[in-house]
Every structure is written in C-alpha cells, then in structure tokens.
Image (cartoon, helix red, strand yellow):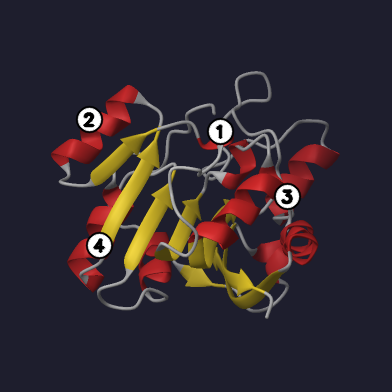
Amino acid sequence: MTHITKPSNISRPDFAAIAAWINPGAKVLDLGCGDGSLLRYLNDKCGIFGYGVEIDDNNVLGCVRNGVNVIQNDLESGLSTFESDSFDYVILSQTLQAMRHTEEIVNEMLRVGKQGIVSFPNFGYWKNRAQVISGHMPVSEELPYRWFDTPNIHLCTLGDFEELCNLCGAQILERIVMNGDRQIAFLPNLIGMLAFYRFERQK
C-alpha cells in the first residue's frame, strides 16, 4: 500500500472525534497508523490497549518512539495475522482512499473487530466539486496531493461510503462530518470536509 503522509498531531479535532467513540480500556487496532500519534492519544485519553499496522519504515520507528505496539505489514495483504473478534475497535483513519481493495479491508475490519471506525476526506465537499468543474482535480488541506503524485485512488463521498457499508453488510451506528473543528449537520455531503463513521456487522 502506498504511504500517506497524515496531518500533524498538533490540534487534531479528528482525534477527539474518534476518542469520543472509544470505551475506556478498549482493545484497539489502528490500520495504517502512521507514527502512532492516534494510538498514543487514545491511550492518554481512554487508557486503551492498542496495536498499529504500518508499512513505512520511518513511521514504524515513530511508533516505537511514541511507545506504540506496531506490526510492519501491508494492509493490502489482509489481516490474517489477527483472529476474528480480537479487538473492540478497528480504525482506518484517512487511509481508506489509498486502499486498492476497499471492500476487502472493510470486510476484514468487520471480522477482526466488534466495531469499525473509518474517516476519510469527503470528495463531495463543495470546494472539491468547484475545482473539478474548473477543470482540475482537487488539491486541498485534506487532499494535498496533485493528480500525478497522489496515493489516493478511491476517493468517495458520504453517499458512496454508505453504499459500500450496505454492500459489506455493515450497520452504520454513528456518523460525524467535520469542517475544520466544526461538526456539520446541514448539507454534510456539500459542506463537510472530513467524514467519520462507526459501524458494526449487521445483526
């Protein structure tokens, strides 16, 4: 899987949004965990027991420096290392759009974890739409790459991801849509920059 450079850990409202869904002491698996900043944040806030999966050498070293348990592996090869229902939460934070096998990773999240949490940049955000209408692929804070050097291969909107959940037999429990540090309730697919979903296997 192509490595994604994630935003700095300084002032991360997206971390707080995810932490609000995590029960204290939960077992958490973070896929594409970067330097382990999210897991460290969740440990500080929620006292979790966490593992990360990361492919990039420098990020694996960052996890070690952050005191985060990490396994170096390519997510595209699946999660066969982990037994079914071995985690309370499996997180895929701002990595979904870089996955080649998107349906497979969501299915694996549902197998390995009791609940899944996914965040991704919303391609339906109005500024993204405006750049496409002007004749260019979007470049923004949430989508910082140009079309020819981007690792993002499966950009989606809120509606697209909800269709994927239905296809995978995932029941959406909660959705948060944000623009910066503000939660968006009105026209979220147009005004929201970043989407968060919490889901589980359909009963």
Between discs 2 and 3, the one toward the N terminus: 2
Query: Residue 80's x, y, as percent?
Result: 50, 43
Q: Secondary structure at mark 2?
A: helix
Task: Say which of marks 2 and 4 sits in front.
Answer: 4
Between discs 4 and 1, the one toward the N terminus: 4
Numbered mark located on residue 105 in the image: none
- Tell whether label 4 touches label 2 (CB within 8 Å): no
Where is 117 relative to 8, above or below? below
Q: Residue flagged by tag 4: what amino acid is it? A: Phe
Query: Of all residues shown, which one is farthest toward the front?
Result: 83
Real-space Cα distance between discs 2 and 4?
A: 19 Å
Task: Say which of marks 2 and 1 sits in front.
Answer: 1
Q: Is residue 138 left or right of residue 98?
A: right
Numbered mark located on residue 77 in the image: 1
Q: Nearer the viewer, residue 121 or 126?
A: 121
Residue of label 4? 49
Q: Nearer the viewer, residue 171 or 156?
A: 171
- Tell whether label 1 touches label 4 (CB within 8 Å): no
